[in-house]
Amino acid sequence: MLLAGDIGGTKADLALYSAETGPQSALVSRRYPVSDYDNLESLVAAFLRATEAEVTAACFGVAGPVVDGQATGTNLPWTLSERSLSHGLGGTPVHLLNDLEAIAYGVPMLSSDDRYTLSSGSAEPQGAIAIIAPGTGLGTGYLVHDGQSYRAYPSEGGHSDFAPNTSRQCALWRYLHQRYGHVSCERVCSGVGIPNLYAFLRDCGNVEEPQWLSEALVEAEDATPIIVKAAQADAPCPICRQTLDLFVSILGSIAGDMALTWMATGGVYLAGGIPPRILPQLQHPTLLQAFWAKGRLGTVVRRMPLHVITHPHVGRLGAASYGLNRMP
């Protein structure tokens, strides 16, 4: 019995699996807000009490770099340790994966119904695959085929430098540089980044902020859902719509950068919580224009397929696949 989980900055997605049913069929699953628990050990204990299950192995994808079996998430309020988690499970083997590594292991198991294709391109069999995942933060990862199967690798490319491509983006960089010093891709292309785009347009973009919106944002714990909802309304709020358009353009550019970094001839996948929620905006030309705008190598990027992962539990799926197929 395997316990697998996708531990994000705001939500934890846990499930039980068996070797007989495989990683695509969870026996039981639960979702928890991470803010309700002091650590992953207490959350896992609550899950096991609720399910009355006994597990023989556990594998978790976690939002942060994993080094020597330990992880401290950039947007996760916990420090995680394989040793501590194993102790809490009575010595059960535990493995921690970077969350993008977990998502990557789930990608080869996706069906055509689990993704939406923005550009079909011309995928090379066994070509490298890139994953860009804007959620609470910005995750990146990739897959390389070793001749027998795909192997996933983590990355912290979301914390690389934001490279502006337009005069407005240059002004955005200057605005955020004064505020933060280092301006990473995550500062502009994630759930924590969307309010930064909004603040820039409000303060520097000569775009009016409605009074009702100002009051709603002051009271909100998380401004991002309010901004996105107002941008997608039948009568969109202009400043919110411009915020989302700016986000989409930046996402397309970063996806193109990652496509070239890993020569993702097998395809580029947009994962994380945000892309499925803004799929209508991703279908506009803005995204693909930014994705393909790579100068002399634009024709190379045009051949790379671009997909949005719509499977709601791909990170947990990948953690389960690793746990069942790769853990001793």
Image (tube, rainbow, N blue to C red):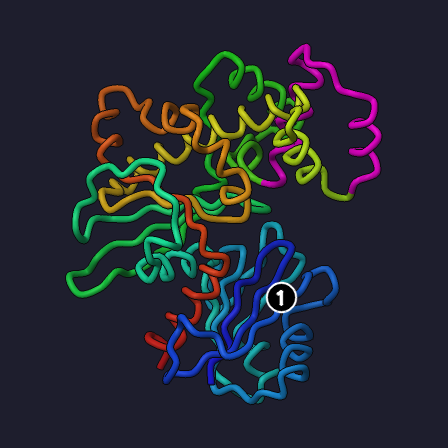
The residue that appears at 30% across and 59% down in the rendered structure is 108
Reply yes or no: does residue 168 show up in magenta: no
Q: Quadrant of residue 13?
A: bottom right
Residue 92, image x, y percentages: 51, 85
Residue 34, image x, y percentages: 68, 61
The residue that appears at 56% across and 39% down in the rendered structure is 190
Q: Is 262 on the left-hand or right-hand side of 182?
A: left
- Location of residue 238 with respect to 104 vertically, above or below: above
The residue that appears at 22% across and 20% down in the rendered structure is 296
Amino acid, disc 1: Arg
Name the residue beneath numbered marker 1.
31
Reply yes or no: does residue 211 show up in magenta: yes
Identity of the residue furthest to the front in this view: 234
Residue 94, image x, y percentages: 49, 77
Quadrant occupied by the C terminus:
bottom left
Range shown magenta: 191-220
Q: Quadrant of residue 116?
A: top left
- Location of residue 24 with respect to 182 vertically, above or below: below
Q: In the depicted view, which residue is nearer to us: 79 or 1?
A: 1
Binning the other alpha carbons within 10 Å of mark 1 as few (below 14), some (14 to 19) or many (20 upward) gives some
- Describe the element under mark 1 as helix, strand or loop: strand
The residue that appears at 17% across and 65% down in the rendered structure is 148
- Location of residue 81 with respect to 142 vertically, above or below: below
Q: What secondary structure predominates along the stretch shown in magenta?
A: helix
Residue 160, image x, y percentages: 46, 37
Q: How many marks?
A: 1
Q: In which quarter of the image is residue 245?
A: top right
